[in-house]
């Protein structure tokens, strides 16, 4: 039956010319072929530059980038520094400018650090698409998966419930200059102040450089200083693993609670064991694919279509919005998923 359904989907896609057969994890059955291919048959070179290569989040994004290339025939690839480092990411962009790529899709570690080099890229005629960077100026388009403040508010809604609305908590970000992650925490803190006035943020945000070991060590230090903390709200994905490890080792299950960004492949063992309670995420593969769609659209001068209401044909990106007055190039999708041990089996990444 599965083989028959796959054949029918493929036959329909070929017959209509409107969608691609799946070459990877992203559901592309609703993607319009005309917005991701060149009318002249030109093959574009599109590099996706991420904060740090080699972690599960961006491994998943690479899958989406590779799928886009396989689906469309464009020359797409992903690259990033081996450790989260702003200067290293800038150098990668410099190298891409020297190579003369057509477009750069970027997830900045530090928006401020990449602004000058992205201006240089755009001055050379290179299209720039940014993600997780709502305040960036030197980009043709900025694509966010959702409203960042609402995402953070949801994390706090869950955490506050487990903490019964009382006690101290801490918050982590990959970098104090990672705009989107800091907006998540802004949203979480605002929700806490409004709905859980008996909760308090114990210390300033912990900068963990998107590294699970750093998360673990910094949280361990905080636990020494504040042994009575009851909650952790995690911005970067690796915090889910660092916090889970610490809670498991210290036997703090049901005493110290976690709500934050994570992936089942990274934090599943801690979810299953009850050491952490809740993770939230969007699919990085879909985000990578979506950025590359916008890059091709911009290269094809289809800027008139890149506006509120645009349907990219991808889950969570079917009706983009432009919520910030005066910034029509800042586009938001509408989707994240919340995962507990009860529904984690639905996700294989």
Image: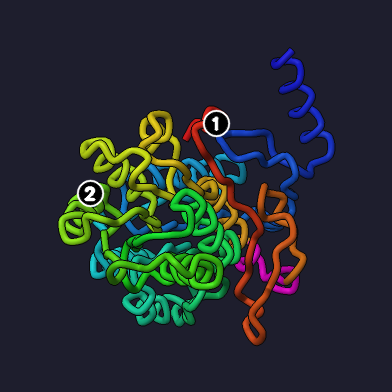
Q: Which residues are magenta?
A: 297-307
Residue 225 placement, left or right of 159: left
Badge 1: few (under 14), some or many (20 or more) residues near its Cα, within 10 Å?
few
Location of residue 154 (image quadrant): bottom right
Question: Residue 113: percent from the left, percent from the top?
Answer: 31, 76
Q: Is residue 211 above or below residue 320?
A: above
Task: Say which label, 2 or 1, has the lower sequence index.
Answer: 2
The colour style of the image is rainbow
Question: Residue 257: percent from the left, percent from the top?
Answer: 38, 47
Q: Is residue 132 above or below residue 69?
A: below
For the N terminus, give its image quadrant.
Answer: top right
Residue under label 2: 216
Q: Is residue 242 above or below residue 327?
A: above
Residue 96 placement, left or right of 212: right
Q: What element does badge 1 sit on? A: loop
Badge 2: few (under 14), some or many (20 or more) residues near its Cα, within 10 Å?
many
Q: What element does badge 2 sit on? A: helix
Taking depth in this image into account, of 146 and 155 the one nearest to the observer is 155
Extreme residue in the top direction: 1
Residue under label 1: 342
Taking depth in this image into account, of 335 and 257 the one nearest to the observer is 257
Taking depth in this image into account, of 349 and 172 the one nearest to the observer is 172
Taking depth in this image into account, of 325 and 280 the one nearest to the observer is 280
Residue 106 placement, left or right of 112: right
Location of residue 317 (image quadrant): bottom right
């Amino acid at each position: 039956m599965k083989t028959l359904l796959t054949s029918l989907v493929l036959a329909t896609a070929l017959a209509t010319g409107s969608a691609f057969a799946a070459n990877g994890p992203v559901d592309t059955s609703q993607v319009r072929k005309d917005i991701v291919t060149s009318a002249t048959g030109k093959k574009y070179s599109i590099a996706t530059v991420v904060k740090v290569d080699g972690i599960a989040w961006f491994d998943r994004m690479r899958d989406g980038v590779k799928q886009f290339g396989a689906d469309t025939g464009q020359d797409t690839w992903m690259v990033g520094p081996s450790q989260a480092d702003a200067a290293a990411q800038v150098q990668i962009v410099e190298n891409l400018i020297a190579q003369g790529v057509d477009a750069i899709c970027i997830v900045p570690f530090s928006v401020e650090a990449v602004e000058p080099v992205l201006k240089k890229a755009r001055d050379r005629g290179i299209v720039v698409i940014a993600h997780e960077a709502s305040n960036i100026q030197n980009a043709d388009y900025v694509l966010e998966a959702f409203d960042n403040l609402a995402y953070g508010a949801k994390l706090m809604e869950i955490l506050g419930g487990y903490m019964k609305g009382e006690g101290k908590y801490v918050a982590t970000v990959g970098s104090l200059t990672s705009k989107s992650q800091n907006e998540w925490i802004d949203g979480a803190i605002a929700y806490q102040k409004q709905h859980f006035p008996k909760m308090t943020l114990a210390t300033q945000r912990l900068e963990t450089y998107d590294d699970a070991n750093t998360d673990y060590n910094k949280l361990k230090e905080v636990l020494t200083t504040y042994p009575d903390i009851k909650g952790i709200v995690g911005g970067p994905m690796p915090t889910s693993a660092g916090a889970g490890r610490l809670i498991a080792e210290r036997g703090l299950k049901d005493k110290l609670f976690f709500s934050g960004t994570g992936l089942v492949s990274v934090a599943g063992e801690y979810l299953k064991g009850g050491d952490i309670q809740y993770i939230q995420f969007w699919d990085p593969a879909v985000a990578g694919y979506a950025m590359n769609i916008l890059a091709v659209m911009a290269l094809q001068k289809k800027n008139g279509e890149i506006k509120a209401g645009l349907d990219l044909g991808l889950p969570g990106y079917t009706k983009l919005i432009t919520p910030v007055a005066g910034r029509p190039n800042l586009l938001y999708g509408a989707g994240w998923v919340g995962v507990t041990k009860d529904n984690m089996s639905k996700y294989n990444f």
